[in-house]
Image (cartoon, helix red, strand yellow):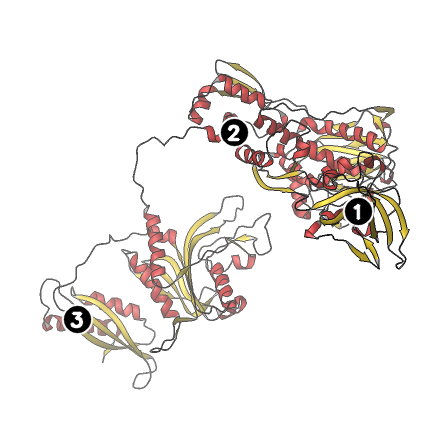
Amino acid sequence: MRVSTNWLKDYMKIDLPINELAEKISRTSVEIEGQSQMQGNMKKVVIAKVLTVEPHPDSDHMVITQVDAGEEEPVQIVTGAPNIAEGQTVILAKHGSVIGNGVKIKKGKLRGVRSNGMLCALQEVGLDDKLAPKELEAGIWVFNEDDAKDLKPGDDAFHALGMDDDILETGITPNRADMLSMNGTAFEVAAMLGVPMTLPKFELHEATQKTNETLQVEVPKELATTYGVRVVKNVAVKDSPLWMQKRLWNMGIRPINNIVDITNYLMLMYGQPLHAFDYGKLPSTNLKVRTAQAGEKLVTLDDVERETSAGDILITADNEPLMFAGVMGGASTRVTDQTQTVVLEAAIFEPTSIRHTARDQNLHSEASQRFERGVDESMTLVALDHAAALMAELAGGDVLAEPVIAQSKTISLPVVSVTLEYIRHVLGMEITVTEVGDIFDRLQFAYQEDQGEFKVEIPTRRWDISISADLVEEVARMYGYDNLPTTLPVGEMTPGQLTPAQTLIRASRHTLEGLGLNQAMSYVLTTPKKAKHFQLEAGMPVQLNYPMSQDRQQTRSSLLTGLLDDTAYNIAHNQNDVALYEQGRIFIADSDQTQQPREIEHLAGVISGNWHQRSWADAAEAVDFYALKGIVERLLENYKFKQEIKFVPTDRHVEMHPGRTADIFVGEVYVGMVGQIHPLIAKEYKINETFGFELNLDTIIDLKKLKTQYNEVSRYPEISRDIAVLVNKELDAATLQKTIVQASGRYLEKVELFDVYTGMNVGSDQKSLAYTLTFVDRENTLTDDVVTGAVEAITNALEETYNAEIR
C-alpha cells in the first residue's frame, strides 16, 4: 500500500527524515518496498494566472497569452490548449524548466511568435495517465475557483499539486491488514515513534426524512455480518476539491468526481470499502444481498460484461444484479453528473466468497484486497457516517436520518493474557513491568496488570493478535529487535550426519554427474495430459482448485515429463546433445481426493543426441538404449542390493517404445523402468530420439543392501578364457550370464559379453553369444587345470539347461 507522509503528518508530528522513517518502519512493522516522490527531478514549474488571450495571427488553433507568473513583467506563452481562457489559474513550465520524462522547456517561436514557456496538463508534469483526473486531449490543467483562492502566481506548482509528497510503498503481510488504511498505519507509526496521535473527526447533520422511507434492505447474516446504507439527496456531482484529489493520486487512485472520490478517500482512511449507487437508476427501492446463480449477466464499472459463478455475492434490486459485492460496482447504477440522490453502502462481506469472485473474474480490486484480509468491524458504520457527512459538505447533499442497518455484529473485545516471566523467557532478556506497560500504552492497547500478569484488551483493528505469543511479538517489535541482547545458543553439541536416505540420494547424484548427466529442476505442476504420463504407481494426479495458469493445473506423477520439457527447451535453443537427471517428489492421490496425496521420492534421467562427441580420432556416437541402460546399471550396482538386478523387456508403458523398454526389478520388487521415449510422444514434445529412465527412490531406499567393503587387488595373475555359445534366439543374455556365474565355481571374477551374432552359418531361430570369462585366485597362483575344469562345468550347465552348442 502507498502511504503519503504528508497525510500521515495530519495524525501526528513527525520530525524524522523520510529515509529514517522508512528504515524504522522496515525494522519494526512491515517491509518498505519503495520510496518515491512524484516531483522527481522536475523543476521551475510554477503557478500562473492567465491575464489575456489573443488569437494567433498565423494559426487557427493557437492563441497568444500573457500570464502572471509572479515576476515583474507578464510572461508571453503561445499555446494550442482548447480550454484556455482569461482569469484561469494554470500550471506554467518556465524557460529552463524540466518537466515529465526529463523534457527541457526553452524559449522559442511558434509560427513566428515568441513563447517563453509552456502551459501544462497534469500528464506533462509527470502524473501518470492512469491517475490524471482528465484526459490530455481536454487541454491544460485549470484550478477551480475555490482551489485557486489559496494559490499565488509564482508559487511552486509541485507543492500546490502535492507532488513533493514523499510516498512509501509498504509490503503488507496477510496478518497486518490493519495497515491497509491510513488510520491503521498512523496507529503503528505513532506507537513506533512514541508520539501522540489524533484520528480525523467529522460532524454529521441529518435531515428530518428517514432513510427507511426511501429504501428497504434484505441481507442474510451468512453473507454479510455488518451491512448498512444511507441515502443522500440533492447532491451536486462535480470535481473534488484539490486537497482530496492530491491525496487520491498520491495514493495511486484516479479522481473521478466528488461522490466516488469520497468513497475511495475514506476507504484509504479507514480500510473500509464503500460503494455509491445512483438512486434514480435502481430498478426498485428494495435492495437484496444474495448469492449468484451461474451464468447471470452483469456489466461492471470497467464496462465489461461478465457472467457470474455460483457462490458470488451480489447486490440486487428487483432481482437484477447491480454489482459484485465487495469487488466491483455495476455500470447500470454508476454515479454521473446527472445523479441527484446517492445510496451509500458499507458492509463486511464473507471473505471467502469475495476471494472466489476476485479470482474467478480476475478482478483484484482495492476493495476485494481489504475484504479478503479483513476490515475493522468497529469502523464500518463510522466510515458510512463520515462519507455521508463529506457528501453533505462537498456535494451539498441532504443526509436522510437514521441509516438502514440490515445486519450489525455485536462486538466484544477479546482479552489475551501474558506474564512478564513468559516475555522475559521468550525474548531472553530482562524487561520491567513499566517498560511492557509503556509499550501497550503506545500501541493503545487497554490492559490490567497484576503481579506481572497483563490482561490485554485487543482492539478490533488488530484481529491478528489472539495468543500470548502475539503479545510477546508486539513487545519485541516496539522494544526494538536491534536492542535485544545477542546470545549464543546453549545446549549439548551433537555432530550432524546424513540419514541413510540422504546418503543414498546424495550418492545417486554424484554417480549420475560422474557419468556425464547434469542436474535439472522442473516444475512440480503440469497439464492434466502430462500429469498422467510415465506413471510408475497407480493413482491420480492432484488437481489444484486455483491454478496459476493452464499449464500448471495438476501435480506431476512422473519426473520424466519435466525432463522432456527441459530437453525440448534445449533442443529449441540448438543444444541437441542433452544428458539430464532430476531427483524430486511426485504426488499421487487415491480415489478419495479429500485425503492428503502420497509424496514419493523419484529419480529420473534422459539422454538425447550424441553420447560421444566427434574428435580428430573418433566419429560421433549417438545415444542408444544400451548407453542409458549402462548408466542405470552402474547406478543400481553402486547401491549393493542383496538381491539381483533384472531388466525385463516390456511393452506396457504406452509412452515408451514397445520394443526398446525394460522394467527394472531388484529380486521380485519393481523399482522402475528404462527405455526409449515413444516416437509419437517425442513428436509431441518436438524432440529428437530420446531415452529415459525413472526409479522409485523410496522403494530403493527400503530394499536390503550389502555393506560396502574393500576388496584388495589380487597379487596373483588373472586367467581369461573366451567362450561362444549358440542358443535359442529368444533367450536373453542376462539369463544365460546368471547360469554361467552359478556353474563357474569360486574363482570366476568377471563375465563380459563382447559379441552377439546372427546370420550366416547360424540358424534363423538361433543366435551366438560370446563371453570373456576372467578367473583369479586371491590366495594362490591359479593353474590352467583349475580354469579348464571351471569352463567345462560352465559348458555342461549351458548344454543341459539350454541345449546350447559350444562353438
Is 628 or 732 nearer to us in this picture?
628
Look at the image and tell me in which quarter the C terminus lies: bottom left
Neighbour tally class for label 2: few under 14, some 14-19, many 20 plus, Cα within 10 Å: some
Residue 82 position within the rendered picture, expressed as x and y whole percent measured from the top left? 86, 51
Disc 3 residue type (three-letter): Ala
Nearer to us of marks 1 and 3 is 1
- Farthest residue toward the top? 451
Q: Would you say 518 lies left or right of 727 here?
A: right
Numbered circle sitting on residue 63: none
> Residue 649: horizontal and vertical position, in percent?
38, 67
> Residue 612 appears in which quarter of the rendering?
bottom left
Measured in 3D between alpha carbons, the distance from the residue under mark 3 to the one under mark 2, in whole angstroms, is 83 Å
Task: Look at label 1 and name its amino acid.
Answer: Lys
Q: Quadrant of the N terminus?
A: top right
Query: Is the C-beta separation of discs 3 and 2 under 8 Å?
Result: no
Dot 1 falls on a residue whose secondary structure is: loop
| Label 1 Cα crowd, 10 Å radius (few <14 / some 14-19 / many 20+) | some
Residue topped by disc 1: 134
Q: Residue at x 34, y 57 (%)?
A: 510
- The residue most toward the front is 72
Kind of element beneath mark 3 = helix
Q: Nearer the viewer, residue 24 or 726?
A: 24
- Measuring from the top left, give residue 759's x and y in whole percent: 33, 84
For marks 3 and 2, the one nearer the N-term is 2
SS label for mark 2: helix
Q: Which residue is mark 2?
A: 477
Residue position marked by numbered label 3 in the rendering: 793
